[in-house]
Amino acid sequence: MKNIGNSIGSSGRLSTEDYYEDEQISKLAISTFQAKEEEIERKKMEVREKVERQLGRAEEETKRLAHIWEELEVLEDPLKKEVAMVRKKIDMATRDLKPLGQSCQKKEKEYREALEAFNDKNKEKAHLVTTLMELLTESERIRMKKLEELSRTIESMN
């Protein structure tokens, strides 16, 4: 606000340079936010791809296990140890998938929250700009009124 106050000329308006600088700052902030948003989206996609790969592996493991299970049913007792090992691998794959799914959900939630915060700040900025313009207009009107009064006072003295 101090810079704005210093940059207001005798007409009560912001200089073109200050307006351009404020516009550049706004563009930089928007650009920075968009870059962060793209980074979040990229990471989100990476997590999704990892989850999909894990799901693909789990499906392949499930198919292989089903095949092994069929063979085990034919053989019954001789392969109990291998069946137990395969079941353990399935359990491990399931445990590996759970945190990845939770991470993906967390990243999606963070993205929604960041987007909501951005929209709120954008609305706040628009409101503040509107308030500033109203204040500048009112200030200009009051200054013009005072100048007219002073001018009349000076003319009445002559």
Image (cartoon, helix red, strand yellow):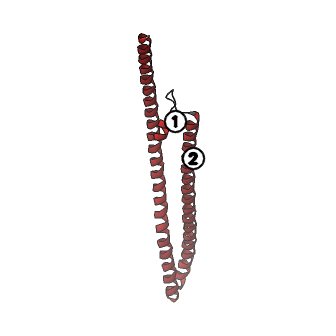
Q: Residue shown at 46%/60% (left/top)?
A: 106
Give, as a three-letter code, the residue at label 1. Ser
Residue bearing mark 1: 7
Give, as a three-letter code, the residue at label 2. Leu
**Marker disc for residue 87:** none
Circle 2 crowding by C-alpha within 10 Å: few under 14, some 14–19, many from 20 = few
Q: Residue shown at 43%/27% (left/top)?
A: 139
Circle 1 crowding by C-alpha within 10 Å: few under 14, some 14–19, many from 20 = some
Answer yes or no: do the residues labelled 2 and 1 have beta carbons within 8 Å? no
The image shows residue 68 at horizontal and vertical percentages of 56, 79
As drawn, 101 above or below 90? above
Judged left or right of residue 45, residue 140 is left
As drawn, 58 above or below 21? below
Helix, strand or loop status at disc 2: helix
Foreground of the two, 72 or 55: 55
Nearest to N terminus: mark 2 or mark 1? 1
As drawn, 72 above or below 53? below
Judged left or right of residue 31, residue 127 is left
As drawn, 96 above or below 72? above
The image shows residue 36 at horizontal and vertical percentages of 54, 54
Foreground of the two, 103 or 9: 9
Q: Residue shown at 41%/21% (left/top)?
A: 146
Where, quadrant-wise, is the C terminus in this rendering? top left
**Quarter-of-image position of residue 137:** top left
Q: Residue shown at 43%/33% (left/top)?
A: 131
**Quarter-of-image position of residue 52:** bottom right
Residue bearing mark 2: 28
Helix, strand or loop status at disc 1: helix
The image shows residue 86 at horizontal and vertical percentages of 52, 80
Foreground of the two, 133 or 98: 133
